[in-house]
Structures are given as structure tokens and as C-alpha cells.
């Protein structure tokens, strides 16, 4: 296939759905990791094509959704300073901290700017040598190479007024946390194709072995996802637990080696709190010691502090596949995209936003009776 429309062909989708029905003999629960995959599933109704008992649950792969409230609060403190130009991807501007967001800081005079690349923020620093320019670096392994490049270039070119507030997260430790939970219901994963384009998939092989769970690296178009599901349920029905690659047009087993080297040069692995989930060991990236001068937390003297989430929001359960958004009591009433209680409703990749956009009035199918083991 050469054109994106071909990956959205309804006839081919129905053929995949029929093949899945023929393969599936028992109930299974599969998690798609990435919020982009969640949106495709909900938008095109792919879950409604699947046989009864084959359940898709949505994972933690929305970077905006899992950025902890502590990081948002640090961003708000920095952005409110009169000497700072605070640069961020647009998605982050409406993510609520404890009682405000970046958009409200901007509305009250903060110089908050939307950029499309960290290199744009670096250029703003070059153009404004009398101001401090801070880039809010969030996201998974996908965005880490570009962020690493910005810091690398800032040091190389001696751009002393540039710094980065880093809140990167890593996918494999999150998968292990889900699988290690006593409440886990997930029996197979669709891994995020763009993350694996950078990182490859060797990191997933020990996880598939240790937890005996199939992991299929999967793309983002409807036929990608249906093919990924087909590969995953085939493994489940055959009792196999391997890492397979549906997204071979973009992903190799080794991934993008130069990008990985750049990540290792600039960042170091660190424990990270995930919004709604809590701290996961070795699940984040921070700036390495040799780049500490470019760390906005050091530059502005921000201390770590633990902050509690709003008790009204159940996004932690949504992000672990334990709750579908319409099962949350606030969905569509006290929590809407205009007045979000949690980040999964704010982000364009959030599962709650996906259901609200594409299925605002539709009741969700409840979980099958099976839990953990096939019936
Ligand atoms: S619907 Fe709103 S309150 Fe409920 S889990 Fe989603 S973001 Fe949180």
C-alpha cells in the first residue's frame, strides 16, 4: 500500500474483522499503548467490529495525560516569571495543574509561546539573548531525540539563556507496571509504532518472555490496528508470547541507532511519577549531569514536592486499562473538553477526549467475566 486511504479501506477492515472472528475462540483483553491508536479505534469504531469477549483497553501512551501535576506546577511557576519566555507544544497549555493552567498564565501576562519543535525554542533563545527561554520537554521516547538535539546544540553553540524543563517518560517500565499489578487484566499489547521507530523493540523481548505476553509493534491507521490485533490474538490462541512487528514499514528491531545515541548522550534514566499512576522506577529521562546547566529546575531553583491529584478524576484507572472513560461518573457532565477535570480529557490523544469526541452519548460495553486467565 502506498497511500493513507488504503490503510482506511472499509472492505479490507471487514475482511480483517472476519478473520479475527474466525481466529478467536476464547475471551481476551488487549491493550493498545498509544493514545493515537486509541483515537483511531474509537473514531473508526474498530472495537465494535470485534467478536464478543475480545476486549480492547486503552493504555498510558498519551504523553500529555501522564505528565505529573508536579511538572505542570513547575511549568506554571517558571512561565509566570517576567524574565522568561516559556515554550511548549500546544497540547500542554490547557492541562490543569492544581488550580490553573499555562493558558491562564498567558492570559495574565506570562510570555507563553506555542512551538512545533524544541529547535524553534532554541531559535527564540538566540533571538532574545536578554530573556531566559525555557522549553517544556514532555513525551515518550518519540520526542526525546529532538529534545536532546536542542540541548546538544545549545551547549555546542553556547546559548546560555536556553534551558529545558524535562518530564520525559519511557514505555517499557509502564508495561511492566501494568503487568505486575494484582488487578491486571491485560493479556496482550499493541506497542506504539512511533516509539519503536526510535527505540526498536529489543527492550520488549524480555518483557514478553518474563510475563508470557504477546507484544505486537503496531501502526496507527485502522488496517494497521486490525492487523496488529489479528497477530496478537493469533499468538494468544496458539499460546505464544513473542514480540512481532506489524509496523515494518517504519520499525526495525534495532530502531534508529543515532537517535538512541543522542538520547544516551544528553539524558539519564530516572524514576518518574506518572499522572494518575504514581512513581515508576527507571521510567523517565532527566538531563545528564554534564548538561545540568541546561536544566530549568536547577536554573530556577525548583524543589521536588509531591502533589495529590483531584480525587474527582479517575484517569489513573483509565490509563491502566481498568476503566473505560464513560464508566467515570464525571464523564460528559462535570468533566468535558471545555471544563476538564483530568489530563485524559484535555489532551488530543487522551482516551476520555476520544470518547467524548466520537461517542459522547454511547454507553460503554462492560468487561467480560474473564479476568486474568482465558475462560
Ligand atoms: S472523564 Fe474526566 S474525570 Fe473522568 S477519568 Fe476522564 S478526565 Fe478524569
Image (spheres, helix red, strand yellow):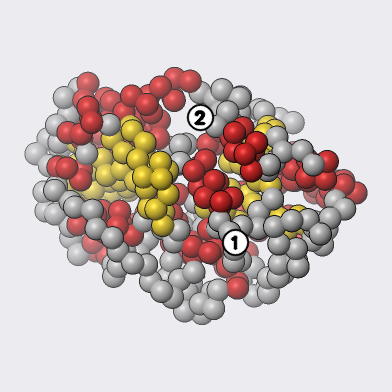
Left or right: residue 12 versus residue 37 is right
Mark 1 vs mark 2: give the one in front. Answer: 1
Residue for point 87% across, 53% down: 25
- The residue that label 2 is drawn on is 198
Which of pointers 1 and 2 lies earlier in the amino acid sequence?
A: 1
Which part of the image, by quadrant, shows the C terminus? bottom right
Residue for point 28% across, 35% down: 287
Q: Quadrant of residue 262?
A: top left
In the rendered view, would you say 285 is above or below 343?
above
Residue for point 39% across, 53% down: 279
- Between 163 and 242, the residue placed more toward the observer is 242
Q: Give the x, y percent position of residue 225.
A: 70, 45
- The residue that label 1 is drawn on is 183
Q: Quadrant of residue 342?
A: bottom left
The CB of the residue at mark 2 lies under 8 Å from ligand 1:
no
In the rendered view, would you say 191 is above or below 315?
above
In the rendered view, would you say 369 is above or below 212?
below
Q: Give the x, y percent position of residue 122.
A: 25, 34
Q: Give the x, y percent position of residue 91.
A: 41, 53
Q: Residues within 10 Å of mark 1 (few under 14, many from 20)?
A: few
Residue 308 visible in image = yes
Q: CA distance from mark 1 to mark 2?
A: 31 Å
Local SS, label 2? helix
Residue for point 42% across, 71% down: 341
Which part of the image, by quadrant, shows the N terminus? top right
Amino acid at each position: 500500500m502506498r497511500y493513507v486511504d488504503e490503510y482506511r479501506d472499509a472492505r479490507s477492515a471487514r475482511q480483517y474483522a472476519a478473520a479475527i472472528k474466525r481466529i478467536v475462540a476464547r475471551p481476551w483483553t488487549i491493550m493498545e499503548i498509544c493514545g493515537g491508536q486509541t483515537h483511531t479505534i474509537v473514531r473508526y469504531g474498530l472495537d465494535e467490529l470485534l467478536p464478543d469477549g475480545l476486549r480492547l483497553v486503552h493504555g498510558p501512551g498519551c504523553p500529555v495525560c501522564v505528565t505529573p501535576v508536579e511538572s505542570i506546577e513547575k511549568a506554571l511557576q517558571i512561565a509566570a516569571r517576567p524574565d522568561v519566555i516559556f515554550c511548549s507544544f500546544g497540547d500542554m497549555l490547557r492541562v490543569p495543574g492544581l488550580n490553573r493552567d499555562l493558558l491562564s498564565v498567558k492570559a495574565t501576562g506570562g510570555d507563553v509561546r506555542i512551538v512545533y519543535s524544541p529547535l524553534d525554542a532554541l531559535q527564540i533563545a538566540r533571538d532574545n539573548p536578554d530573556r531566559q527561554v525555557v522549553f517544556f520537554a514532555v513525551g515518550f521516547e518519540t520526542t526525546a531525540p529532538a529534545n536532546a538535539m536542542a540541548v546538544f546544540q545549545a551547549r555546542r553553540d553556547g546559548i546560555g539563556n536556553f534551558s529545558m524543563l524535562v518530564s520525559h517518560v519511557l514505555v517499557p517500565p509502564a508495561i511492566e507496571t501494568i503487568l505486575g499489578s494484582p488487578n491486571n487484566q491485560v493479556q496482550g499489547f499493541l506497542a506504539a509504532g512511533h516509539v519503536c521507530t526510535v527505540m526498536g523493540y529489543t527492550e520488549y523481548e524480555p518483557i514478553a518472555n518474563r510475563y508470557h505476553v504477546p507484544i505486537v509493534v503496531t501502526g496507527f491507521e485502522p488496517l494497521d490496528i486490525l492487523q496488529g490485533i489479528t497477530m496478537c490474538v493469533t499468538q494468544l490462541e496458539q499460546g505464544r508470547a513473542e514480540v512481532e512487528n506489524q509496523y515494518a514499514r517504519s520499525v526495525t528491531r534495532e530502531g534508529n541507532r543515532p537517535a538512541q545515541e543522542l538520547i544516551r548522550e544528553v539524558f539519564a534514566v530516572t524514576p518518574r511519577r506518572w499522572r494518575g499512576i504514581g512513581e515508576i522506577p527507571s521510567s523517565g529521562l532527566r538531563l545528564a549531569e554534564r548538561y545540568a546547566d541546561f536544566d530549568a529546575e536547577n536554573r530556577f531553583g525548583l524543589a521536588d514536592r509531591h502533589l495529590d491529584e483531584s480525587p474527582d478524576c479517575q484517569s489513573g484507572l483509565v490509563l491502566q486499562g481498568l476503566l473505560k472513560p464513560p464508566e467515570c461518573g464525571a464523564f460528559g457532565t462535570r468533566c468535558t473538553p471545555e471544563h476538564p477535570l483530568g489530563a485524559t480529557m484535555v489532551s488530543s490523544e487522551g482516551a476520555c477526549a476520544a470518547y467524548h469526541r466520537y461517542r459522547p452519548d454511547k454507553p460503554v460495553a462492560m468487561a467480560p467475566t474473564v479476568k486474568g486467565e482465558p475462560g
